[in-house]
Amino acid sequence: MLRQFRPALLMIVVMTVITGLIYPLGMTGIAQLVFPHQANGSLIEKDGKVIGSTLIGQNFTSDKYFHGRPSATTEPDPKDPTKTVPVPYAADNSAASNLAPTAQPLIDRVKADAAKLQAENPSAPVPVDLVTTSASGLDPDITPAGAFFQVPRVAKARGLPEDRVHQLVQDNIQGRTLGIIGEPHVNVLKLNLALDAMK
Amino acid sequence: MTSNGWIQIALFSVIVIALTRPFGGYMTRVFNGERTFLHPILRPIERAIYWCCGVDEQQEQHWLTYAVAMLLFSLVGVITLYALQRLQWYLPFNPQGQTAVEQSLAFNTAVSFITNTNWQAYGGETTMSYLVQMAGLAVHNFLSAATGIALAIALVRGFARREAKTIGNFWVDLTRTTLYILLPLSVVVGLFFVWQGMPQNLNAYVDATTLEGAKQTIAQGPVASQEVIKMMGTNGGGFFNVNSAHPYENPNALTNFVQMILIFSIGAALTNVLGRMVKDERQGWAIFAAMGVLFLAGVTTMYWAEAHPNPAFAAFHVDSAPSALQAGGNMEGKEVRFGIADSAIFGTATTDASCGAVNGMFDSFMPLGGMVPLINIQLGEVIFGGVGSGLYGILAFAIVAMFVAGLMVGRTPEYLGKKLESREVKMTILALLSLPLSILGWTALATVLPAGLAGIANTGPHGFTEILYSFTSATGNNGSAFAGLSANTLYYNMTLAGAMLMGRFIFVIPLLAVAGSLAGKKLLAPSAGTFPTQSPLFVGLLVGVILIIGGLTYFPAVALGPVVEQVAMNHGTLFAGP
């Protein structure tokens, strides 16, 4: 029986070298060579400064920008490190609300958010993705419905005709992969960059 | 529910079916030590490993030696992984300066990754250095998966061999699985993942200045290389806290689809390996069919439940109806790029198998939607199942099914040409009883102790479900969670580790004993009285036995959690925050 001890010990060492060092470091080397943009996090730079990643959602609050979904991420409270404070879209601490469908705090939050959005655009019901937090807290996307809903507010804040902003949203809808897989969505950061580029 | 959703479910099923036979054929060759197209490259490495570790590849093992080898390997794994986490501050590849992982959390995580559970009481990006992720967690993603597959192959050999004393060599099975199956696929699919947007770097976290001028720190790391084995090995321990919901860990619908297929690929192929090893592939397809029926039942229920909006939202003028412009349904805790259908397939597959990765948060699922993963695990994770553990799990149920059939006609049961006698049936029942003992025992304890109740994030029946789910997931070696539960406490870290150990080892050791005793038996030729185990009748019997055992064992507990919550929700009852 104790004869199995030596292979047990050595097997861990050898396999750690193969699958834990050679494999991931080799993969990193190849990835950096062949797909450097993706391998480094799909970052976007503007004037030499990193402004974010196309894959990671950002917190937008200004009326001039399209907003992403509510985010449940937090950071440690600077005053008391044992507690946390809400910091939406904290990309170094992904998290979800984990609220049950029957939880009073969830229903209260949705009620307040829906009322706020309704005041911005009374002409249509509020798309559900705009009042629900994502699984990651970093969802980069909203639904096309969620983007169209915000067109009147953004157009007014920028002094642009609504149909031009509407068209911009239309142009930024990413459909399903191969027409089948996933759901249509609009990347909020890309949409807002396109908005800033509009004359 | 939309027609596109059903098409996606159909497409997923067709791809899994199509992969089963070719992949099963390749794996059979590997386990039999036959030559494959990768031999010119990998065979010299394989030999070097045996030489290095002092393994004689010709020498086969008795089931007891096989079990001891597996246990010693797991013990050494726990110790080294624990040490790595505690010492990460002193080691390289730690650009964020992560400090030593707290003792009970490090122990919980070490047990969790050795048992193929990959329960996350930690958040990856806030706790673990890149070295621990690569050389600790990812290594055990490979090794615990390879261990599970080796154990399943040992049990299959028990059925396939006649009057043999041995069931294979653990070290050889482990090495071959890692080298010929897991590693090559990881390289190929891992690079595909990078192409699709998954990071693969060793950089420090990036500070970005957002369009509105705020500071955003974006976590980085060697994500892709870990992600692929996390899915394929049905490990499920995410690089990041929110697992496959994180846009870096699952950038788009295509990576999501590939991840879902990876969850089932090996488990499905192993049914074909069983068929090939007992020289009748239809035996494998019968097992596959039973698994397939249960998968479709689960995914349909979950898709139906999640496509419904939260009834409380209707009063606030919220639009949850599916249309060309939105998926609608219950979007709390889900990602827009996946919507409802892909969250339902993923959630069902990850708990059918013992994967436990998530792309949406079960804690925020509808009561009956969240019940599906709970029941999937409680049925023993035999619906394709964890790599290896799914196959040995369903073979245990097949033994019980044939025992029940034998009782009906008063005949000694047989399965795959082997007589099932008192010893095999006793050992199988011992294995199957260990799961409810752990799940229900630990849950009952936590619900009466203040330390157990301290962790819940939602009150009422949902809080009970959170506790029940945690011990179900740990015992089933799944690793998914109703993640609101604050599980990173001394109480939960230790009790959940206990549940994981019971679920892995008390379950599998009796089954290795069954393998040993079956291998020593004669192979009977089928006669007129033999129950045809490649027939639809057998599939029905097997599904029935799984559902009856699961139902009798867990119905009371499930009724107290999700069922009560669904009734309460329909009545408009809400539960205050904790």
Image: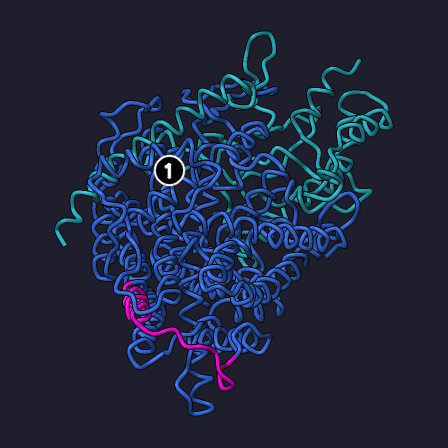
Chain colours: A cyan, B blue
Outermost residue on the left side: it is A2
Residue of label 1: B138
Report which quarter residue B500 is drawn in.
bottom left
The answer to which of A175 and A124 lies nearer the viewer is A175
Q: Residues within 10 Å of mark 1 (few under 14, many from 20)?
A: many
Q: Secondary structure at mark 1?
A: helix
The answer to which of B356 and B280 lies nearer the viewer is B280
Report which quarter residue B181 is drawn in.
top left
Q: Quadrant of the C terminus of chain B?
A: bottom left
Percent position of residue A2, x then y: 12, 51
- Residue B555 vs B484, above or below: the answer is below
The answer to which of A12 and A139 lies nearer the viewer is A12
- Residue B98 vs A180, above or below: the answer is above
> Is residue B369 highlighted in magenta?
no
- Say which chain tag 1 marks: B
Q: Residue sitting at 39 percent across and 34 percent down?
A: B42
Q: Residue sitting at 33 percent across and 81 percent down?
A: B421
- Identify the magenta region: B509-531
